[in-house]
Structure formats: C-alpha cells, structure tokens
Image: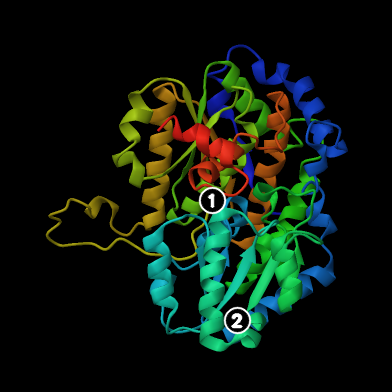
Amino acid sequence: MNTIKLDISQAIQAIPGKSVDNLLPEAASALAKVDNATGAGNDFLGWVDLPTRLSEDLINDINATASQLREECEVVVSIGIGGSYLGAKAVIEALSDSFAAYRTDGRDPKVVFAGQNIGEDYMFELMRWLDDKKFGIIVISKSGTTTEPAIAFRLLKEMLERKVGKEAAARRIVAITDAKRGALRQLATEEGYKTFVIDDNVGGRFSVLTPVGLLPIAVAGYDIRALIDGARQMQQATTAASYDQNPALLYAATRNALYRDGKKIEILVNYNPKLHYFGEWWKQLYGESEGKDKKGIFPAAVDNSTDLHSMGQWIQDGERTIFETVVSVEAPEHETLIPTDNDNLDGLNYIAGKRIDQVNKMAELGTRIAHVDGGVPNLRITIPALREQYLGQLIYFFEKACGISGYILDVNPFNQPGVEDYKRNMFALLEKPGYEEATAAIKTRL
C-alpha cells in the first residue's frame, strides 16, 4: 500500500543525546490518552475512530445531496469559519485545477466560501458575482449564532429567497448543525432544509472528515470515499506505541523534543502551490490545540520556492528558534518539459529537456541541505501524489499527532478558551444585549 512517509533523520542530529528516544514513555502515555479517551478534553475525541465509524448510509446521503446541489447550481457557497471552512478549502484547493476559478465549461459547480471573515467588500463583491448565477448554500454552524457565518448566511439567504422564492431556496440550502438545539437547527426545521449533524464530540478543527468537510468536497466533484479510505488506513497505522510502527507518535515526539531544546516555531513547508490552504488548515489545528497555559509551538507556513525569495533569508540566517516540516509531493499530475532555446540568453539550456518537477525537487533538496547546515532541523513528510486517498492519510496523520503532541505538552488539546476573549470584547463594543456592564467597562479603555 502506498502511504505517506515521515523522515526525521535531518532533525534528530540537532537534538541533544537521545531526547526523542527518551520521550517514548511520555509519547506512549499520550497516545493511550487519545486512544482510550482518558485525558483532558476526552469528550471531544469522536474524531479518533471517525473514519471507521462513517457509515455507508451517511456517505451515500452526502453524495446524493452533493449530486442534487451539483444539478441545480452553478455555484455553491459554503458558509463557515475556522474548522468549518479550512478543511474543505484545503482539500478542494489541493485537488483542483490551479485555474479552475477562471474555467467557464460548467463541468462542476464552483465551491466558494463565505463567513470566514467580516470583510464588507468581500461580501459585496461575492453577492454581485452571484447575482446572475444559480447558486446554493451549505451553512455550517453548531449554534447558528457565530457572528461571521451568521452575517453571511443572513445576507445570502435573503438574496437567494428574493431570487427564487422561499420554497425553491429551501431546496438549495443545506444546514450542517447541532442535532437538536440552536438557532440554525430551529430555522432548518421550520424551513425544511436538508440537514446533517455536527457531532458533539468532534471539534471544528477536527471536523474535515465529517459532513462539515465531506459535503463541500463532494459538491466540488471529488471522491470522498477515497478520502475516507485514506484516513482509515492511517487510523490503523497510528495505534502502535512504537516509533517504527506509528509515524504520528514519532512526529509528535520529535517536535516536542525540538521544542524542549528551544525550537519554539515550526514552519510547515510545501513545494506545491496547491498545498497553500493545507498549511492554513494545519496552522489552526496545531495553534488552537497547543497554544495554552503559556506553552506551545508557534505554527507558521511557507510556500516554496516562492517564499524563499521573501522568508528565505530569515529562515536561513535568523534566530535559531525554528524547525521545519517539509511536505513533499512525489509525483505531479502532469508533465511539462523545459525546451531548448538556440540563443540561450537566459542560460537555462543546462536544464533543457528536464521536467519542471525535477528542478523543483532539486530546489527542495538544496534548500533542505542549506537550512540544516544553517541550524534549522528538518522533518520531511512525503506524499505519493495529490489524490484523495493520500490527503485522507495526511489529514488523519496530523490530527492524531496533534492529540498526542498536546498531551505531551500537558495541555488540553481539544478546547480553545482564548478564542472567546475577542468575542466578548467585540460584543461589548457592538453593545450586544446582555453585555451592558462589559460595554461600559471597555468604553473606559478607549
């Protein structure tokens, strides 16, 4: 079976002694907390066995709903924020033609996103673009009251109902929400929307393999069964309490050994521009899971070779508080050869006849060697190709490693108390009912 692979050989040489080996008892204990649901936040561990729990009935229902939206809509707007947006965006971007946004052949509905920001120009321009198009909506919110997606849904729901009427609009709206309670559940019941459930025991940043991620991915035309199969393969591959049999355990232990040695920043590096949003998803997964109690590795991401011309200098010669995890795609989907030019004014004839990917791989290798020589430990994850199966493996690998790593850090990887602070301030500043005291208090600080 082809699978993703982890190589830490260019990282362990930077760690004193046998730090990674010495971490095995802690890592094994953390793994047991994840698998046996005995650690902090254990009521949010529904994602651990999710790939094998997903039923054929649910997968068929998601695919059937996606087919209906694909038949009726030119565009489907997926409304959500954080984990309700980034997972689907990451997979769709990784699998899509780089210029799909400009395609006019109508082969598949375009999946676009809203509710992930409060940009007024963004919403105005989205609504203007949708004005002459047949569109549908997937709205993702457990409560239905999260500010960013609630604003977007109010606007787009009103627009869709005005265009096609309430009855037709209801057929083009799918709500992914709580099973029984919340404003969105109530509205979906009243209006007759098709619904899917967000399980109580799966947090947003771990939800890409639930209908939250699977429905938009299926609408975009991709094989969610293959995605789930890949995740199932990695679920089975990450149960052993040994480094040689469990890549997620090895990754979690290595990054924590580096952290204890003063490496406070992890940079996720890709050499394929289709993985940009995968880096964004990874940043939320690790940042929101580990950044607590004044602890945690700061997650950053770069797109190389592009960012070698912007961030490369800092990474090579800046403060030595960083390490890199490189995600390398072994095989591109297409082949393009560099031509010969008789005049050779650009001096590129020495690589004429080579594939672009061969040059890219040498850029990757040369950069890794330079960065290791410059004191930047490097881990490398290889993925055979950008296909649904391997993305499913990669998603589950990072999720499992995240839970293990959080417990090694001795934090609760599954809550996010700090996220509520900005919301309280925002509500107070907007004078939301019930926040009168907070409004008065915050105004004294302005």
Tell me the quarter of the picture where residue 40 sits: top right
Residue 361 lies left or right of residue 327; in this view the side is left
**Circle 1 crowding by C-alpha within 10 Å: few under 14, some 14–19, many from 20:** many
- Between the C-alphas of marks 1 and 2, the distance is 25 Å
Looking at marks 1 and 2 on the same chain, the residue that comes earlier in the sequence is marked by 2
Work out whether residue 34 or residue 315 is closer to the camera in this orientation and state it.
34
Q: Quadrant of the C terminus?
A: top left
Residue 196, position as x, y percentages in the image: 75, 67
Residue 152, position as x, y percentages in the image: 52, 64
Q: To which residue does mark 2 refer?
A: 70
Tell me the quarter of the picture where residue 154 sits: bottom right
Residue 435 seen in render: yes
Badge count: 2
Residue 360, position as x, y percentages in the image: 39, 49
Residue 335 lies left or right of residue 345; in this view the side is right
Task: Tell me what residue is drawn at x 63 percent, y 32 percent.
Answer: 290
Residue 47 lies left or right of residue 268; in this view the side is right
What's the amino acid at mark 1? Answer: Phe
**Circle 2 crowding by C-alpha within 10 Å: few under 14, some 14–19, many from 20:** many
Work out whether residue 99 or residue 10 is closer to the camera in this orientation and state it.
99
- In this rendering, the answer to whether 378 lies above or below 109 is above
Residue 114, position as x, y percentages in the image: 51, 63
Q: To which residue does mark 1 refer?
A: 278
